[in-house]
Amino acid sequence: MTPTSHHRRRPRRSAVRHRFVAALFTAVMCGAAALTGAQPVAAAAAPWVTVTEGFVSFRVPVADVQNAVGTVSSIVVEANFGPSSNVSELGLGRSGDAWTSVIGPLPAGLYHYRLKADGTRIFADSTNSATVTSDPSWRTLFIPGDSARLLTDVPTGQGGAITTITYRGRAANVWTPPRYDARRSRPYPVLYLQHGEGGGHADWAELGRARQILDNLSVEGRMEPMVVVMGDTSGSRNELEHLMRAVHARYHVARDSAHQALAGADSGGTQALRTALTRPGEFAYVGSFAGAYPEGGLHIDARSVNAGTRLLRLYTGNVTDPAYNPTYRLLRGLDRAGVRHEFDGVNPDAGHNWTAWQENLADFVPRLFRSAPDPGPSSGHLPLREEFRPPAPGTTPTPWLTTLANGDTFVTVETGTEFTGAKQVTLWGNWAPGGSWVNVPLTRVGDRWRGTVGPLKPWFYYYKFIVDGVSQKDAANPTRVTTEPTWSTFLVPGARARLLTDVPPGQGGTVETLTYHSTVAGEQRSAYVWTPPGYDPDRPAPYPVLYLQHGGGQSYTDWVEMGRARQILDNQFRDGDIVPMVVVMGNGNVPDFTRELRENIVPAARAEYHIADDPAGQALAGLSMGGFQTYDVLKTHPGEFAYIGTFSSAIGTPGGGVDPTGYDPEAINNGTTLLRVYVGNVTDFVYPFTMATMAAFDRVGIRYEFAGVTQGPHGWDAWQKNLIDFAPRLFRPDTQ
C-alpha cells in the first residue's frame, strides 16, 4: 500500500506575528551557518534532507522548487511523522534561498516523504535516490537505533538475496535465504507476502524493509530457511495462482500446503483471510496484517479450516487503524464459529501503516514451518475488548478523549456542518515529537469532518482546523486563546501533566486583571497578576515579585491561556516548591519595553499589590521576544532584578547578530543572584543564537546558568517546562 496523500495549504502566521518574529526567524535561519561555523555547500550538490541524532532537517533550495513545479507560495512535507506513524504534513518556511524546517527527535525507523506546493503540486526529492516504485513521488529515509534493529542492514555477505522475476506482464521480488541451495533434496518452504491497496511488488522491500527483517531474523537463527515471494496480485485468486506457477518454475520451493504460507497487509491481508476461510487447506500458515474481512454472512466450515490451517494469526493497529473495529468483529465471529486463531493484540503505537506491518512481519515469520513461539500477543500489545465508538455526530463539547487500558489517550475532533462543502479539512496541532506542529487529515463523515489522533502523552495541547487552506476555530470547544482566535485547547490528564492541571477549588491562588496607563503606547493597558493562596496585603514583609513576559505576537493573556502559568504556580505552591510570591504578566508590545516596564508596569503593580521594590525581591523573565526584552533590561539596568530568566532568546537584536558590547560583566555578576538561560532543541529556531549568547557571555566573563536543552521547539511545550524549572529557584538563599 502506498503512503496516503492529503491536501493542506500551509496556514499563514497570524497577522499579529509581525516584524519582530519575522525578522528574528529570518536572521536566525540565515545566520545559523555563520554562528555554528558551518561551511556553505553548493545548493546543487546538497541533499534536501539530512538526519542528525534523530532530527530531520529539510532545506529545499528555491531554485530546485522552481525547476520542479514553478513559483510557489507554500510547501509542506507529507510524511509518516505524525502520531501512530500516520502520514501528516510538516510546513516548511521560506528562509532566504531555501524552504526549511526541522522535526524531531524521531524514533528510529523507516520514514517516507514527499513534498507538496500550494496544496496540489506534488514533487519528489530529486537529491534522494531511495524511491518508492509504486509511487515515485515518495522517497524514504532511515533513522538507525536499537528499536529499529531488525530494519538495519546486516553485515555484507551475511544476508539473503533479492531478485526480481517477471511473469505475464507482472513482477515479483523473491528473497532467498543465505546459502540458498537449489539442489538440496528437500524443497524450501515458501511465504507469499502480499502488498496493500494501490501498492506494488516492491513495496515490501522499499517500505516494509522486508529484506532487512528477513536477513536479521535469519542471521539470528529465529526463522526457518524459506523463500519469500513478494508479488503483485491485486487481490485476485487467478493472479496468485499465476505467481505461484512462476515461482515453482524458477525456485526450489514446496508445493504442498504444509510448507506454504500466505500473508499480507491491508487488502493483501484481506486476501489472505479470504483464502484461509473460503478455501481452507491451501496454505497451512496465514497472517492478516490489518486486513478487514468483508462484513456480513461469515459462513465458515470451521472443521475444514481447523484441519487445513496450522496457524491463522491476526494483527491490527490502534484505534486510528480502519481495521481496528473490523478486526474486533472478525475475532468475535471466529470465536463463535469455533475457528482456531491467534491474535497479536492491538499495537498501541501504530496505525494502518508500514510501521505496524514491519512489526507484524517480524512477529509472523518466526512462527512458520517450525515449533512456534508463545502464541500470545507481542510484548506491550493490548487486548481488543470492544469496538472504538466515538460519540455521535454533533455531540458537544469537543474534543472527545478516549483513554485505553494501558493509559494511552486518543483525541477525536469533529467539525460542525458549516464545512460540509469543503474539499479538504485537516487538523493542525502540537502533536509531533517534542511539541512540534503537524497537520493531520480529517475524513468526511456525513455532513461533518472527523478524525482521531494519538496516542498522546499527558500534556497540554492546542489545535485548529485548516479548511481549504483557511484556519478555523473548533466552535464546539469553549476554550479560547485571545491572541490566536482560531486555536482551541485541551489537557490530557496524567502524572506527566500534573503541574498543568487545575488544583481543587479553593486551593489555588487568584488571577486578577491590573489596568494601567501606558505612557509608551499612549493607551490604557492590562496585565494579569497571580497572587498566592492566603495573599495578605497587610503582612509586614512585602511579597517578592516575578515579572513574566510573553513573546512576539502574543500579549499578557498568553501565559495564562497558553502557558498554564496559573496551574503551574498553584501546584508548585501546594507542593511547597515555590515561595509565596506575586507574578505580574504584562503587555510587552511596545517599541521601548524597558521604559514600559520601569515607568508603567512596575509602578502600577507596586501601587496595587504589596510587593518588593528592592532588587533582591524582584525577578524578570520572558520567552522569545520577552527574553530579548529581559536581556535589554539586564544590559541597561544591571542589578535591578536579582533573578533573570530567558526562554528561547538571545542578546542583540533581530538581524543584528550576537554582540555583548554594552553589557557590564562586573555589575551584572555583582547584582544578579541568578541568570538562567533556557532554549529548546534544534527545532527551536533561536537555538544557534542562544548558544552564541552563552559563548559571548563566556568571553566577557558574565556568570550564568544553562538549564540544558529543553526537549521541544520554539513553542509552549518548552516554555511551560522552563517556567516549571525557573519559578522554584526564585527568592531562596540556596538558589542554584
Image (cartoon, rainbow, N blue to C red):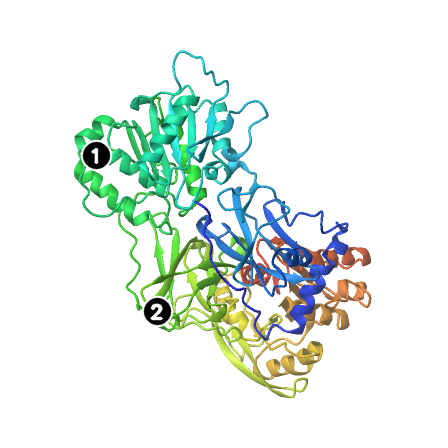
Please identify, in this view, whether the residue under mark 2 or under mark 1 is nearer the observer.
Answer: 1
Residue in front for this viewpoint, 499 or 449: 449
Q: Position of residue 586 (x, y in %)?
A: 59, 77
Occupied quadrant, residue 27: bottom right
Q: Nearer the viewer, residue 705 or 343?
A: 343
Numbered label tally = 2
In this view of the protein, can residue 325 be seen by the observer? yes
Rendered view: 130 above or below 116: above
Looking at the image, which residue sits at the far top?
185
Q: Which residue is drawn at 39% across and 33% down?
A: 193
Is disc 2 surrounded by few (<14), some (14 to 19) or many (20+) residues within 10 Å? few
Instruction: Name the amino acid type tagged 1.
Output: Val
Up/down of 202 relative to 712, above or below = above
The earlier-in-sequence mark between 2 and 1 is: 1
Q: Which residue is drawn at 31% across and 69% down?
A: 394
> On the image, numbered disc 1 is attached to which residue?
339
**Element at badge 2?**
loop
**Helix, strand or loop at disc 1?**
loop
The disc labelled 2 sits on which kind of residue?
Pro
Residue 707 in view of the camera: no
- The image position of residue 535, as x and y in percent, is 50, 75
In this rendered view, identify the residue nearer to me: 89 or 537.
89
x and y percentages locating residue 639 in the rendered image = 73, 69
- CA gap, disc 2 and disc 1: 43 Å
For residue 397, the mark is 2
Task: Judge left or right: residue 722 versus residue 655.
Answer: left
In the image: residue 259, left or right of residue 281? right
Q: Label 1: how many residues lie within 10 Å, few (<14), some (14-19) or many (20+)?
A: many
Nearer to me, 319 or 519 = 319
Residue 254 occupies which quadrant of the picture?
Answer: top left
The residue at the point 48 percent across, 62 percent down is: 428
In the picture, which quadrant includes the N terminus?
Answer: top left
